[in-house]
Amino acid sequence: MNEKAIFAGGCFWCMVEPFETRPGIISVLSGFTGGDKEFPTYDEVSGHWTGHVEAVQIEFDNEIVSYSDLLELYWQLIDPTDANGQFYDRGDSYRPVIFVSSSEQAALAEKSKKALQASGRFGTLEIIVPIKEATTFWPAEEYHQDFYKKNPVRYAAVHKIREKFAKKVWPEFNKKSKSLFWKK
C-alpha cells in the first residue's frame, strides 16, 4: 500500500537522491510546507518570509520499505541538533522538521527521535527536530525537481558537506555494504 512521508532537512536538493534510490520508493518531490503562504515560490521561501521550509514528499510502498526505514535514513541526512538550518544552508526555511500525516507516523517518529537521543551518538546535544502535523505540501518549480540528475556537478558540491558529516557521525556505514546513505 502506498503512503507518503514529508521530511524537511535543509536544502531539498540533497534530500532527494538518498530516498529516491532506495527500493520501494515511488517518487520524491521537492517542495515547501509548514508555512501560511499559498502557492509559494522558491524565491519567497528562500527569502524567509513565508514560514515554509524546504522539504521532500516521498511516496513509498510500505510493503517494501517501512516508514521506520525512512526515518532511519532521514536521521543520517541531517544534523538533528541544529535548529537554525542545515550545514551551509542557514535560516528558517532550512530547519529540519518531520511532518506526520497519521497517529502511527507520529508515534514512530517520536520513538525514533527518542532512540536517537538515547543512543548518545550526538553526545549531550539535544535532538531538536520537531514532529509536526503535515499541512499542504506545495511542489517547488520544475527546475528544482531531480536536481541531482539535472545538475550533477553542482549537486556533488553541495552534497559533499553532508556526506562528510554523516561519515563522521555514522562511521559504521563507512564499512558495511548495507549502508543506507552511500552507494557502493
Image (cartoon, helix red, strand yellow):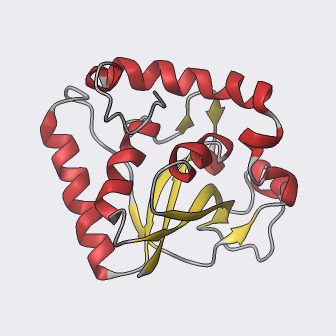
- Rendered position, 56 above or below 85: below
**Residue at 60% from the left image edge and 44% from the top image edge:** 17
**Residue 80, quarter of the rendered image:** top left
- Rendered position, 16 above or below 79: below
Left or right: where 56 falls relative to 177: right
State the image coordinates of residue 95 (x, y, percent, origin top left). 54, 47
State the image coordinates of residue 112 (x, y, percent, origin top left). 23, 54
**Residue at 61% from the left image edge and 49% from the top image edge:** 16
State the image coordinates of residue 63 (x, y, percent, origin top left). 34, 72
Left or right: where 113 falls relative to 131: left
Left or right: where 135 falls relative to 40: left
**Residue at 54% from the left image edge and 54% from the top image edge:** 8
Q: Which quadrant would the N terminus be assigned to in this image?
A: bottom left
**Residue 82, quarter of the rendered image:** top left
- Rendered position, 48 above or below 158: below
Foreground of the two, 145 or 117:
145
Foreground of the two, 144 or 89:
144
State the image coordinates of residue 116 (x, y, percent, origin top left). 22, 43
